[in-house]
Amino acid sequence: MAIRNIVKIDEEKCNGCGDCVTACAEGAIQIIEGKAKLVSEVYCDGLGACLGHCPMDAITVEKREAAEFDEEATNEYLASTGRKPIEPQPFVCPGSLSVELSKKDSKVAADVPAGDIPSQLGHWPVQLKLVSPMAQYFKDSDILLVADCVPFAMADFHQKLLKGKNVVVGCPKLDDCDFYIEKLADILKMNTVKSLTVVHMEVPCCSGLCGIAKEAIRKSGVAVGFEDITISLDGGIKAREKVT
């Protein structure tokens, strides 16, 4: 047994649609008595490819003591059910498939209607829960770790902060901070990161994003500091601080 990430299903929310069953390449989820259930811990890799397929938001990823994922046992189980063995690649969910978007320059592109402002987003997905630490866009990148309320408050977020950076988004109050720490640590360990910028709202709970960054840096063993940017409720930059 080990402490690791594993899928958790809220049966009260589950409507038994079965979308998660087809989305799970490992066959770890089945519909039993009208509800989605994790049939075995050893079949669940904890990556959460099923998350984006649940229409009821009944699936999350939690960190707890669980049996280790067993690829060999999983493939034997899949073979017994007539399914193909799993391929050694994460994030088969289309919503979390790593995609590098076309780069935007500082001028409005010729095909953008007058008055429209082009997006500065350079990749997909953006949720820290969904991104792969092995995504190519993290290589030699400037990473922007952003609280998910920031782009709603800050009207010029794309031009002022997002431009030229690779963004990951999360909420330190509502989401699993331990999971975020592990994921960010993996990103830092697996890639040569040129810089890290943390952007959060001025409300106290949102500053927890800095704690996530600090702990992830410690766990990664990578010597990197970051810039801490605080956004006011009216959308302005309230403070900037270098954290080493």
Image (cartoon, grey):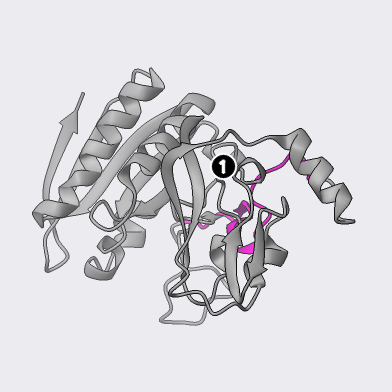
Question: Which quadrant of the structure image shows residue 188?
Answer: top left
Observer-nearest of 167 and 80: 80
Residue 243 % position (x, y): 19, 29
Read off the residue under disc 1: 137
Residue 93 drawn in magenta: yes
Observer-nearest of 227 and 174: 174
Observer-nearest of 165 and 223: 223
The quarter of the image holding the C terminus is top left
Find numbered disc 1 in the image and state the secondary structure of the residue it sits on. Answer: helix
Look at the magenta stretch and give its main secondary structure: loop
Question: Which quadrant of the structure image shows residue 216?
Answer: top left
Task: Identify whether 185 is placed above or below 202.
Answer: above
Task: Identify whether 68 is placed above or below 208.
Answer: above
Count of marks, rendered view:
1
Residue 168 drawn in magenta: no
Left or right, 153 with respect to 143, comes to left
Q: Looking at the image, which residue is at 27% across and 58% down? A: 174
Left or right, 102 with respect to 84, comes to left
Left or right, 228 with respect to 42, comes to left
Residue 165 % position (x, y): 42, 46
Q: Is residue 151 visible?
A: yes
Q: Looking at the image, which residue is at 81% across and 42% down? A: 75
Residue 74 % position (x, y): 75, 42
Q: Mark 1 packing: few (<14 Cα in 10 Å), some, or many (20+)?
A: many
Q: Is residue 84 visible?
A: no
- The span shown in magenta is 86-105
Residue type pointed to by label 1: Tyr
Q: Looking at the image, which residue is at 56% across and 35% down? A: 67
Q: Looking at the image, which residue is at 25% across and 49% down? A: 199
Left or right, 213 with respect to 58, comes to left
